[in-house]
């Protein structure tokens, strides 16, 4: 009786022509991954400084600190801010009257700023920011 | 005596296809990384109403270490206006969208100068936010 010899073919090479397709699929995968980034948010158009009217003092002022919000100098709760602002904006038809000047303390977090400015937008106000001007002064040597 | 012509075959070797595609892959990945800011660490702030925005030419990012990046490249605070202006070029109104990605805990002393710089050069600011979970 003849014994059958067992053949072991350990090395099975994949077809070289398939590597192009594999790499092409990888390219598509990486490009799709790169394009799936959060790009939704909120548009905001800030009036340019030269567009501000001369009657700036009559505009509504909102001051922001780390965790508080003030409307024309009066501290109010964040939940009540929207109602209070709507009341202040009532009857103001002209665009320049609806400008709300937002002044933030340097340590105001962005998340807090976004919540308040969103409320201003929804109430029909036009957000404009007022930053503190830094003046450098040279003290003469005595 | 008649000699028959031999038709010579000139095939592109299929073995090389893998190498070509692999090099293309490396090229695209490096290119995407240079222009992209997905590798930067930041967490978006949340808002109730957000809308899907189209593509933007410029992306200004402030990461968790309060560093400024324009299209993934680190810049200084004073460079923002100039960089954004050069990237926007003479783009018409409506095409001057600038994505503004700020880490939710970044402070006003960092993000307000950037907002001022973008609006100064006529960029249409789009705050990139996530939907607030009720």
Image: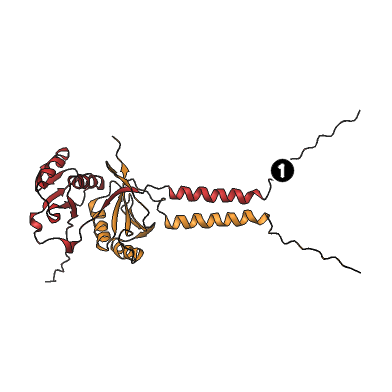
Q: Secondary structure at mark 1?
A: loop
Instruction: Return the x and y of residue B70 as percentages of the image width and height.
Output: 35, 58
Residue assigned mark 1: A12
Q: Nearer the viewer, residue A36 or A141?
A: A36
Tag count:
1
The residue at 13%/40% (across/down) is A83
Image quarter in which the C terminus of chain A is found: bottom left
Pick out the residue farthest to the top. A1
Q: In the rendered image of this protein, which colour is used for chain A?
A: red
Quadrant assignment, res A11: top right
Residue A67, compared with residue B30, is above or below; it is above
On the image, the x and y values in percent for residue A121 come to 20, 47
Q: Is residue A73 above or below residue B124?
A: above
Left or right relative to B30: residue A132: left
Pick the residue in front: B2 or B33.
B2
User: Residue drawn at (69%, 47%), measured in percent from left and top?
Assistant: A15
- Density class for disc 1 (Cα within 10 Å; few <14, some 14-19, many ≥20) is few
Q: Which chain has been coloured orange in this picture?
A: B
Identity of the residue furthest to the front in this view: B2
Residue ID at (12%, 46%):
A70
Q: How is the image coloured?
A: by chain
Query: For the N terminus of chain A, which image quadrant?
Result: top right
């Amino acid at each position: 009786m003849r014994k059958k010899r067992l053949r072991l073919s350990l090395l099975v090479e994949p077809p070289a022509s398939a590597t192009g397709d594999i790499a092409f699929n990888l390219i598509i995968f990486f490009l799709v991954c790169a394009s799936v980034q959060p790009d939704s948010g909120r548009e905001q158009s800030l009036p340019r400084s030269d567009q501000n009217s001369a009657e700036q003092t009559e505009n509504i002022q909102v001051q922001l600190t780390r965790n508080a919000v003030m409307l024309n100098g009066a501290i109010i709760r964040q939940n009540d801010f929207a109602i209070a602002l709507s009341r202040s904006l009532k009857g103001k038809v002209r665009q320049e009257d609806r400008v709300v000047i937002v002044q933030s303390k340097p340590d105001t977090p962005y998340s807090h700023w976004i919540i308040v400015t969103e409320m201003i937008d929804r109430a029909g106000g036009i957000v404009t920011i007022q930053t503190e001007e830094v003046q450098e002064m040279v003290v003469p040597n005595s | 005596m008649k000699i028959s012509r031999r038709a010579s075959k000139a095939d592109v070797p299929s073995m090389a296809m893998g190498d070509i595609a692999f090099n293309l892959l490396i090229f695209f990945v490096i290119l995407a990384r240079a222009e992209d800011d997905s590798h930067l660490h930041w967490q978006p702030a949340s808002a109730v109403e957000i809308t899907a925005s189209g593509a933007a030419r410029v992306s200004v990012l402030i990461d968790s270490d309060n560093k400024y990046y324009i299209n993934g490249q680190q810049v200084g605070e004073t460079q923002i206006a100039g960089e954004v202006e050069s990237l926007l070029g003479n783009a018409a109104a409506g095409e001057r969208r600038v994505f503004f990605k700020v880490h939710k805990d970044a402070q006003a002393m960092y993000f307000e100068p950037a907002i001022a710089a973008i609006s100064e050069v006529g960029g249409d600011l789009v705050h990139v936010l996530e939907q607030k979970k009720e």
